[in-house]
Amino acid sequence: MSVRRWIGLGAAFAVASVALAACAPAPETDDGAEQSETCVRMVTNSGGLEDRSFNQSSWQGLQLAEAEHGVQAEAIVSTGETDLAPNVQQAVDSGCGLIVTVGFELAEATLAQAEDNPDLAFAIVDETVEAENVKPVVFDTAQASFLAGYLAAGVSKTGVVATFGGGNQPPVTLFMDGFVDGVAKYNEVHGAAVRTLGWDKEKQDGAFTGDFEDINKGKALTEGFIDQGADVILPVAGQVGEGAASAALERGGVSVIWVDSDGYDTLTPEFRPVLLTSVLKNTQDAMVQIVGEVQDDTFSNEPYVGTLENGGVEIAPYHDLASLVPTALDGEIEGLRQAIIAGEIVVDSPSAP
């Protein structure tokens, strides 16, 4: 199905802005008529806009869409659970033709507004909402975290690696499933016995901090893993992961794999010495694509699924820790990437999109 067609601005794109409270009204034409199809509103989850995760990357994508498609983007920032539903209502009331919501916390409010506004296009990042006018934007991160797990096992000096999540939710555990499978693959190929702490794929249970914001919880959990010998940590917990990076930096000899965005760019430079790589979601390109689909009247509720094949997921460069990765190991990882793309290796997970 398609929703109302967007009309391009046809002129220089407007400068993006962040709406912390009231959202600006939809832009008007010279004769005063409302141009609802020229703007997009994004509602963040409670992690805020600069979460070094999918709020931030989704916003970056909409800024790119401004330049490429000539639309005006604004972000409505949620600071707590009570903001979520009112902020989605505010986005709808703006008169914009596309509403983007970010994260599972916004699923209920997105569905309610989509049902009440069937002529509007909605996209929800990192969550699936089933409605005729809602496009889920999801990522098969297990494929990329499989590569990260293989890498972690290959560089570990202690033979122990670890992962933890912010909450036991499919977008989180999908990373963790791929990670432990990657470690297992390394053990199979090399006859090794690298152990993974923090996640039991068979039981779908493991270590969680219970939120995505309390950095101290991430630090404490990581210190416990380090005490058990772990020297590579994968936190899947948004801002909480910064606590893992802090513990790694203080203890020494420990590296961290970031998620969603390239932590080398989004974290403060002090953490660069401990960042081995990042498991990336290319939310930016997804946002540009969806804005283009709405403009072209080809928008549908068919999910956007990011994979290694379409570039929707990937692992980041090794940056300052490239010297830890032998050429042979890097070559093995590239071979695994191509095998996954070709379907020769299937990375499965009960949380797969």
Image: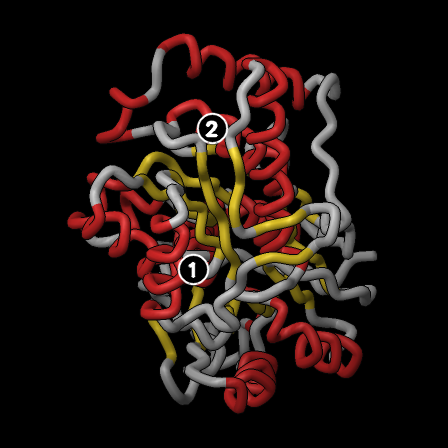
The one nearer the camera, 59 or 277, is 277
- State the residue in front, 27 or 299: 299
Left or right, residue 242 beside residue 350: left
Q: Quadrant of residue 256?
A: top left
Instruction: Inspect this view and state whether residue 268 appears.
Output: yes
| Circle 2: residue type | Ala
Identify residue for label 2. Answer: 153
Q: Position of residue 216 (x, y in %)?
A: 32, 70
Left or right relative to 177: residue 254: left
Q: CA distance from mark 2 to mark 1?
A: 33 Å
Q: Is residue 310 left or right of residue 16?
A: right
Q: Nearer the viewer, residue 81 or 252?
A: 252
Q: Amino acid at mark 1?
A: Trp
- Mark 2: few/some/many CA within 10 Å (<14, 14-19, 20+): many
**Total tally of numbered discs in the picture:** 2
Tell me which colouring the rendered structure shows. secondary structure
Residue 71 in sight: no
Identify whether 263 is placed above or below 294.
Answer: above
| Badge 2 or badge 1: first in the primary sequence | 1
Picture residue at 67% right of the left edge, 75% below the top: 110
The x and y percentages for residue 120 are 70, 71
* Quadrant, the N terminus: bottom right
Q: Secondary structure at mark 2?
A: helix
Viewer-nearest residue: 145 or 133: 145
Q: Are marks 2 and 1 in contact (CB under 8 Å)?
A: no
Is the residue 149 above or below the residue 53 in the image? above
Q: Residue at x 71, y 64 (%)?
A: 4
Q: Position of residue 31 (x, y in %)?
A: 47, 78
Q: Secondary structure at mark 1?
A: helix
**Hey, which quadrant is residue 124 in on the image?**
bottom right
In this figure, which residue is indicated by the disc labeled 1? 59
Instruction: Mark 2 vs mark 1: give the one in front.
Output: 2
